[in-house]
Image (tube, rainbow, N blue to C red):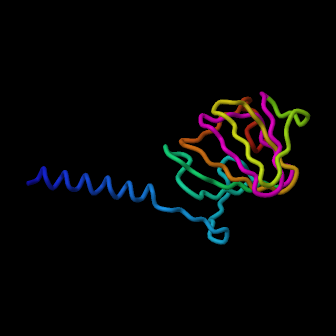
Amino acid sequence: MRSTMAALIAVLAILVAAACATAPVTALPENVKWVDHPTFPGVRLAVLHGNPAQPGPFAVRLWFPANYQIPAHYHPNDENVTVLSGSAHLGHGDRLDKNKATKYGPGAFFRVPANMRHYAWTSEETLIQVHGVGPAGLTWVNPADKPGKL
């Protein structure tokens, strides 16, 4: 009897987890909760779905002020970015080089594969949406470039 009850509870837990994983997620702009980004001073972050620090899919929005620079870095996961407003400049390499980058405006999408070294900056207030599969992370190519020293 106990093993039957334990099996039933296990099946119910699996069904509840599956239902939660397939439940729709909505994020109306007026209901999105913004917080200060823990790594980038002056940047705002809103988690729309999932948890970037945990295994599984996630979607976040990031608001950057004008002229914000993100030095060369890389991630352990693919980074999928859509520019919602403003403009983001993206380049590939070991150091930020404004002569070797592409400008992406509203509606543009770019994907940076895992472990590809890249850098970015904004030329105006910019809102992007990033989605991927966690756990996400960030490693600076040059640790001395860590924000706060920009």
Residue nearer the viewer, 129 or 74: 129
From what the image shows, is residue 37 above or below residue 147?
below
Q: Image quarter for residue 78?
A: top right
Q: Is residue 76 magenta?
A: yes
Residue nearer the viewer, 2 or 138: 2
Q: Image quarter for residue 113?
A: top right
From what the image shows, is residue 104 above or below residue 95?
below
Please give the name of the residue rendered at 78% of the width and 27% of the height, measured from the top-left corner: 94
- Expressed as whole percent of the image width and height from the top left, the position of residue 53 reads 54, 45
Please give the name of the residue rendered at 70% of the width and 47% of the height, measured from the top-left corner: 81
From what the image shows, is residue 120 above or below residue 127?
above
Residue nearer the viewer, 45 or 49: 49
From what the image shows, is residue 44 above or below residue 137?
below
Task: State left or right for residue 59 relative to residue 99.
Answer: left
Q: Image quarter for residue 70?
A: top right
Magenta range: 66-94
Please give the name of the residue rendered at 27% of the width and 57% of the height, measured from the top-left corner: 12
Q: Residue furthest top?
A: 94
The quarter of the picture where the C terminus appears is top right
- Expressed as whole percent of the image width and height from the top left, the position of residue 54 reads 50, 45
The quarter of the picture where the N terminus appears is bottom left
Task: State left or right for residue 126 relative to residue 23.
Answer: right
Q: Residue furthest right?
A: 99
Please give the name of the residue rendered at 23% of the width and 56% of the height, measured from the top-left corner: 9
Q: Residue furthest bottom?
A: 30
- Expressed as whole percent of the image width and height from the top left, the position of residue 55 reads 49, 43
Q: Is residue 49 magenta?
A: no
- Expressed as whole percent of the image width and height from the top left, the position of residue 37 reads 67, 53
